[in-house]
Structures are given as C-alpha cells and as structure tokens.
Amino acid sequence: MVRVQQAPFDVGAELAALSAGRTDIGGVASFTGLVRAMAGEQAITAMTLEHYPGMTEKKLAEIEAEARARWALQASLIVHRYGRMLPGEPIVLVATAAPHRAAALEACAFLIDWLKTEAPFWKLEETARASRWVEARASDDQAAARWARQR
Amino acid sequence: MRILYFAWLRGKTGTASEQVAPPAEVATVGALMQWLAARHPGFAEALTAPGVVRAAVNQDYAEPGDPVRPDDEVAFFPPVTGG
C-alpha cells in the first residue's frame, strides 16, 4: 500500500496495522526517515517537502510493485509526507512483511534506496537565516545502483 | 502542452505551470527545453549546468531525445531529494 499525505503518522500504529489479524507473517522490517535538526554545521529549523502530485503516487506504486516482484512479501507499506515539518518529525516510512527475515530486510532496504532516487520529492531546508534546496547526493545514486538487476 | 516546474526551477521561471503551444518542429524534450529557454532566461541559465535539469513526460522520467506531443504534460525539475 502507498500513501502520500501531509499529516504526521504514528510509526507504531502503522507497523501494528501491517500484521494485524494475521498469523502467517514471520517478520516485519521497517525504515523511518526523520527530519534532522542539523545539516552539517547548520541548525535546521524546519524542512518542507515538495512533490509532484500524481507522479509521486505513480512512482511509489511502481517501486512497491518492483519490490513485490523481486521478493516474496506478505505485506508492504510506503507512507511519505509532504509539506512543512519540524526536526524530529517522521518524513517517510517503508515496511515489509515476509515469512523470514532476509526477504523483509532486503526488500525494505531496496524500497528506501529506490524511493530516494525515483520518487519526485524535493527538500527545502530552513535555517534561522535562510532557506535552501537540498542537493542530491551521489551516495544515494550509488545505493540505488546496487539493486540494479544482474544481467 | 502543459509545462510544470518544481523546486528551485520554479523560482528560475517565475511560474509553477504554464500552457504553451510550441511550433511543430519542437518534437522532443531537448527541443522543448531549448524553446522554453528562449522564453525564460532563468531556465536557460539552469540548462548551462549539465545534468541538473531533469524531465518527465506524462509523469514518467524522460530523456532529451524522447518525443513530446501537443497534449502532453511535461515537467522539469532538479534531481530528486526525497526519503
């Protein structure tokens, strides 16, 4: 399931809902991305996430479908927020459920790595003095590239 | 053709979206970028740094050689930074 929303979410409630009422799931893996208070030496007062409505949902659904094609998952969830948030608030949650840990952990890492390079979101950091758009990191491209299919 | 600009590119063009009718010879993403650059000096400036301006046609990532048609939605934006 994919959700793109402005409102904060409760990580515990989301994870509980993923396996609620089921006894076939052996493990749930998750990653939660949070707004950091520091970017290098700079104190961040807020972060605004802009997105491309429509394309965002489409890309996240494609990424989720790719994970489910590669790993035998019993459930999966991507929640990504947009709008203005404060340090400590959650930005993104990805969670995967599988009978055994390897599939859940690998698929979870894949989802967040791919999401960071494929989903059309842009971060605007606010400091006490100014706002600036966050630049893409080469390390994120490298993290996504390690999931390229061996041909 | 509907054109969208995101993140700091929106600041370069001064608009989030615009409806345009380029001539028929503007048939690829790359040609459209050059045509838009003539309308927006800030967009032209952004194009001078290679690889900084990315594109999507009808909500799928596109390369400069990909085709554009009159009823397409074409978006331009810097590299994504979500997650």
Image (cartoon, coloured by chain):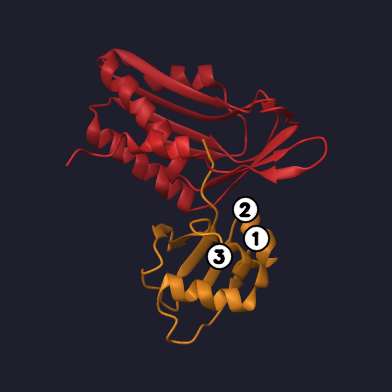
Chain colours: A red, B orange
Residue A43 in sight from this viewpoint: yes
Determine the chain carrying the residue at label 1.
Answer: B
Q: How many marks?
A: 3
- When asked about the image quadrant of residue A84, the answer is top right
Where's residue A114, x and y in %? 39, 38
Crowdedness of circle 1 by 10 Å Cα count: few (<14), some, many (20+)?
some
Q: Are marks 1 and 2 in contact (CB under 8 Å)?
A: yes
Image-based side of A67 in relation to A14, left or right: left
Label 2 to label 3: alpha-carbon separation: 15 Å
The answer to whether mark 1 and mark 3 are in CB contact below 8 A is no
In depth, the one of B60 and A149 nearer the eye is A149
Residue B26 percent location from the top left of the image: 45, 81
Between A122 and A53, the one lying in front of the other is A122
Check if mark 2 and mark 3 are on a common chain. Answer: yes
Q: Which residue is mark 2?
A: B7
Three-letter code, disc 2: Ala
State the mark number for residue B47.
Answer: 3
Instruction: Say left or right for A42 vs A18.
Output: right
Q: Alpha carbon of mark 1 to alpha carbon of mark 3: how far?
A: 13 Å
Could you say where residue A19 lies in the image, as x and y percent from the top left? Answer: 37, 18
- Which element is circle 3 on? helix
Q: Amino acid at mark 1?
A: Arg
Marks 1 and 2 belong to one chain? yes
Decide: is A88 above or below B7. Answer: above
Q: Point out the tag, 2 or 3, that comes first from the N-terminus.
A: 2
- Residue shown at 48% from the left, 66% from the top: B74
Q: Is there one chain holding both mark 1 and mark 3?
A: yes
Look at mark 1 in the image and give the residue it sits on.
B10
Tell me the mark number nearer the camera, choosing from 1 and 3. Answer: 3
* Residue B44 pos. (x, y %): 60, 70
